Image (tube, rainbow, N blue to C red):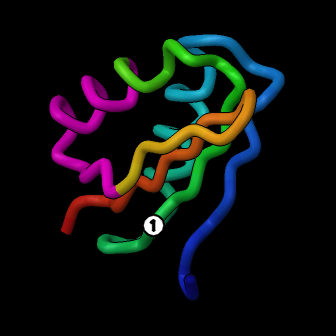
Amino acid sequence: MKNELLLDARELNTPFPVLRTERLLQKMFPGQVLRVVTSDPYCATDFQSYCNETGNKLVECSAFGDNYYYRIQKKF
């Protein structure tokens, strides 16, 4: 999808994918979407909590093989 950025955090364990996500989202425009790929299954809970606390929207959370995929929309 256009206007989406990608963060490949497969080599990072929690909480580092969320910290990198936060850093990138701060530089993005409202409404933009960040796609995050991780290999840490515990990130799902972390991303949900992060989005609840910050007002960003967790648009997608899915898994395929050993990878976990998230789409987070920056709050408006």
Q: Where 42 sits versus 1, above or below?
A: above
Q: In the image, what residue occupies the spot 45% across and 66% down?
A: 33
Q: In the image, what residue occupies the spot 54% across and 82% down?
A: 3
Q: Residue furthest right?
A: 11
Q: Which residue is mark 1?
A: 33
Point out residue 34 in the picture as x, y percentages from the top left corner.
Answer: 52, 59
Nearer to the camera, 23 or 60: 60
Q: Where 76 sits versus 64, above or below?
A: below
Q: In the image, what residue occupies the spot 16% across and 33% down?
A: 52
- Viewport quadrant of the N terminus: bottom right
Crowd around label 1: few <14 · some 14–19 · many ≥20 (10 Å): many
SS at circle 1: strand
Point out residue 46 in the picture as x, y percentages from the top left corner.
Answer: 38, 20
In the image, residue 61 lies in the stretch drawn in magenta: no
In the image, residue 47 lies in the stretch drawn in magenta: yes
Disc 1 marks a residue whose amino acid type is Val
Q: In the image, what residue occupies the spot 26% across and 38% down?
A: 51
Nearer to the camera, 20 or 40: 40
Q: Is residue 55 left or right of residue 49?
A: left
Point out residue 76 in the picture as x, y percentages from the top left corner.
Answer: 19, 69
Point out residue 29 in the picture as x, y percentages from the top left corner.
Answer: 40, 72
- Where are the magenta residues, as a range? 46-59
In this figure, what is the number of numbered marks?
1
Q: Is residue 50 left or right of residue 64?
A: left
Q: Residue furthest front?
A: 65
The prevailing secondary structure element of the residues shown in magenta is helix
Q: Is residue 28 left or right of residue 6?
A: left
